[in-house]
Image (cartoon, rainbow, N blue to C red):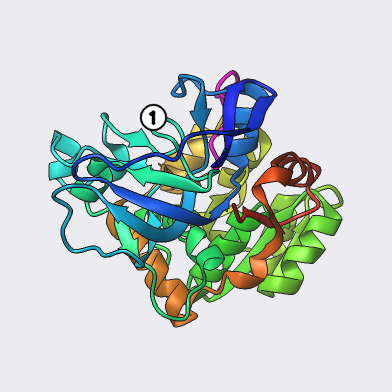
Amino acid sequence: MKVARFYAPEKIVIEDSPEPAPGPGEVKLRVRNCSLCGTDLKIYRHGNHRIDPPRVIGHEIAGEVVELGRGVEGWAVGDRVQVIGAIPCGTCHECRRGRMTVCPNFEAMGYHYDGGFAEYMVVPQKVLAVGGLHRIPDGVGFAEASVAEPLACVLNGQELIGVGAGDDVVVVGSGPIGCLHARLARARGAARVFLVELNRDRLARAAELVEPDGVVCAAEADVTEEVFRLTGGLGADVVITASASVPAQEEAVRYAARRGRISLFGGLAQGAPMTAVDANLVHYRELMVMGANSSSPAQNARALELIAAGTVPVADLITHTFPLDRFADALEILERGAALKVTIAP
């Protein structure tokens, strides 16, 4: 079979590899779609401390069951499935309290285990043990199902800060994650959703798809002034920084409303993780500043339900599909910012 295997920064090789065989408690899939994430681009450029190369990467996975390992029950050849990206242990203090996204023992597909940029892959027993293999609902395509993993992360972020009815929500960043945040916020009852983005063309493209109540091009206007103008001087009830940007994080507290909630959704670069926040604004406005990391198996299942119901459409966010042997082209178009969501169909 063909795989995309990471060897070192700027070295991902499309090569032949023996088809894997499922061990006890494992499931073998024919991968139908594995979508690219900004993290995959970071791995290509810089590597990742959790990856011990060589490793087949890819963690936004959807496929078809082709073989069951010994002892696997409840699944059959031909089942259409989606796989979680982050794998909690299910037994630690955090997992037992239902806080699987902060499991200290978590592992991940494409990091600790070979991922989905391959024609075939094996789903580890650990995934099945925590309920991390999900049936794709009827009417949902494999490409759409692969977007359930990032949507689940978005769902986790919004659940943590309680996005809900009547909220004015500002989403900073208009890539696929920003678009998912905008659509999910509407689905959760937000009164208005505003998009903030530095790149005018990227902002226009996203706005055409998700139809926000207002947009702010951060390269052309003062974001704080514009948000207060758009909200009648009150500020944003919710700010979601859906971009890996220090300035976005620092500015978010300035235009958050009193008792506003801020989600630092986009993680900063490992080498430059520090940000300066006006703590007095946090103090006197009683702001909540919350991180958001990954998603749980249950959130992945709910993400699939949101897609299936049409509550959060994702098909139109997938702008480019490439075969596995054009993986380099997929990375290039993603890095150029010429695409929203890019998927690989091995």
Please tell me whether residue 273 belongs to the stretch shown in magenta.
yes
| Image coordinates for residue 192, horizontal then vertical, percent | 58, 73
Indicate whether 319 appears above or below 271.
below
Q: Residue at x 24, y 63 (%)?
A: 75
Q: Residue at x 24, y 41 (%)?
A: 126
Q: Main secondary structure of the magenta part?
A: loop
Magenta highlight range: 266-275
| Image coordinates for residue 299, horizontal then vertical, percent | 33, 59
Image quarter of the N terminus? top right
| Image coordinates for residue 27, horizontal then vertical, percent | 30, 50
- Left or right for 278, reference 232: left
* Viewer-nearest residue: 178 or 146: 146
- Left or right for 316, reference 104: right
- Left or right for 323, reference 105: right
Q: Residue at x 37, y 49 (%)?
A: 295
Is residue 176 among the parts visible in the rendering? yes
The quarter holding residue 46 reads: top right
* Viewer-nearest residue: 111 or 226: 111
* Viewer-nearest residue: 246 or 55: 55
Q: Amino acid at mark 1?
A: His
Indicate whether 174 appears above or below 129.
below
Indicate whether 304 appears above or below 114.
below
Q: Residues within 10 Å of mark 1 (few under 14, many from 20)?
A: some
Numbered label tally = 1
Which residue carries the number 1 mark? 112
Please tell me whether residue 81 belongs to the stretch shown in magenta.
no
| Image coordinates for residue 164, horizontal then vertical, percent | 41, 70
Q: Residue at x 44, y 77 (%)?
A: 308
Helix, strand or loop at label 1? It is loop
The quarter holding residue 211 reads: bottom right
* Viewer-nearest residue: 204 or 42: 42
Is residue 171 among the parts visible in the rendering? no
